[in-house]
């Protein structure tokens, strides 16, 4: 007797024929290892394939710990309090009793981030993989929060001397755990040509290379103690000198009288612009 194509048989009849025709067992297709961070839970749906799909698939597992469970529909739950590596044996069974077992390793991922950086799962990869990225504090950049990052160089400073060997410098900022200083400085020599010999001026005068004569007297309200500088020193505020060529700060006298109402004498010398009272 021949059966018509498409004839529907009870489930137990299908299994009877499959048992005697080498029913191929289902296979677990999930990865052989999963990862999680310490103190975090992992929930993962296990997957399997069945070459002879009859009656659905059922999962079970020998975990050896109440903190790790696998539901009949394949939900793997690894509790947050479980923080040690372990291995579990997961079995998948089809509706006709054919089954296969796969060993799955559960591993704790040790976060490599430094300087208080924290690990976060890489959203472009499956949950449970060992792909994590570091979330770093602002002052500690880099893949593992330990890079050294330099900012742009500043402009070179002016040379510290006109001749005889001076220094110019520039700086840049440093960010990162390995910075020896927040500011990095670089310097080099400048104006290394020898200084030409020049005439030494007397006190009360200053050196003016473009002037004739070279030694010029200090203007009013300034002074020079040694005559070696190219400019004279300004008197303090509200202080004046009575003549040019002053040689000391003592020549700077306080201008504290009303110049329009009285004659002002400084060191017995009448100050120009003062007015005699009648």
Image (spheres, grey):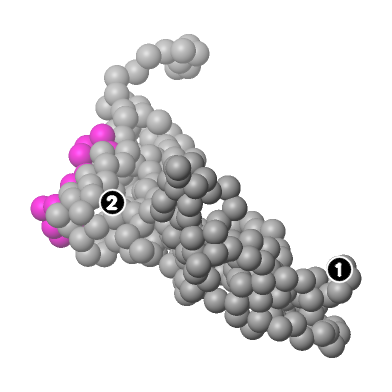
Residue sitting at the far front = 278
Q: Horizontally, is 261 left or right of 74 in the view? A: right
Q: Is residue 86 above or below residue 199?
A: above
- For image coordinates 66% across by 81% down, the residue present is 203
In this view, the mark in front (1 or 2):
1
The residue at which mark 2 appears reads as 90
Which residue, given by chain and number where applicable, does mark 1 sit on? Answer: 211
The residue lying toward the viewer, choosing from 73 and 171, is 171
Q: Can see residue 132?
A: no
Q: Is residue 164 above or below residue 87?
A: below
Q: Is residue 146 left or right of residue 165?
A: left
The quarter holding residue 194 reads: bottom right
The residue lying furthest to the left in this view is 66
Taking 264 as reference, is 277 above or below it?
above
Residue contact at pointers 1 and 2, CB within 8 angstroms: no
At x 66%, y 76%, the residue is 204
Image quadrant assignment for residue 234: bottom right
Tell which of 84 and 265 is nearer to you.
Answer: 265
- Range of residues picked out in magenta: 62-74
Q: In terms of depth relative to the viewer, which is nearer, 245 or 68?
A: 245
Judge from the rendering whether residue 234 lies leftward or rightward of residue 16; answer left or right. Answer: right
Could you tell me residue 238's position as x and y percent? 47, 54
User: In which quarter of the view is residue 200 placed?
Assistant: bottom right
Q: Residue at x 42, y 57 (%)?
A: 139
The percent position of residue 137, horizontal first and vertical second, equals 38, 53
Camera-nearest residue between 40 and 90: 40
**Which residue is drawn at the image coordinates 38% and 64% (left, top)?**
114
């Amino acid at each position: 007797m021949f059966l018509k194509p498409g004839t529907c048989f009870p489930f137990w009849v299908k299994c009877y024929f499959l048992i005697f025709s080498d029913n191929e067992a289902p296979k677990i297709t999930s990865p052989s290892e999963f990862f999680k961070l310490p103190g975090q839970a992992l929930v993962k749906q296990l997957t399997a394939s069945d070459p002879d799909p009859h009656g659905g698939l059922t999962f079970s597992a020998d975990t050896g710990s109440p903190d790790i469970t696998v539901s009949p529909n394949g939900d793997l739950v690894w509790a947050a309090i479980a923080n040690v590596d372990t291995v579990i044996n997961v079995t998948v069974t089809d509706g006709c009793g054919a089954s296969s077992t796969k060993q799955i390793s559960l591993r704790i991922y040790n976060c490599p981030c430094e300087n208080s950086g924290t690990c976060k799962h890489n959203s472009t990869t499956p949950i449970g993989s060992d792909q994590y990225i570091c979330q770093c504090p602002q002052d500690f950049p880099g893949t593992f929060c330990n890079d050294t990052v330099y900012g742009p160089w500043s402009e070179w400073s002016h040379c510290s001397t006109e001749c005889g060997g001076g220094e110019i410098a520039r700086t840049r900022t440093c960010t990162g755990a390995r910075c020896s200083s927040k500011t990095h400085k670089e310097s080099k020599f400048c104006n290394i040509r020898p200084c030409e010999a020049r005439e030494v001026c007397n006190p009360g005068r200053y050196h003016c290379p473009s002037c004739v004569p070279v030694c010029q007297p200090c203007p009013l309200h300034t002074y020079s103690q040694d005559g070696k500088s190219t400019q004279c020193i300004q008197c303090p505020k509200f202080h004046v000198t009575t003549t040019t060529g002053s040689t000391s700060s003592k020549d700077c006298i306080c201008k504290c009288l009303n110049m329009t109402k009285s004659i002002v004498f400084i060191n017995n010398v009448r100050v120009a612009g003062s007015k005699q009272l009648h």
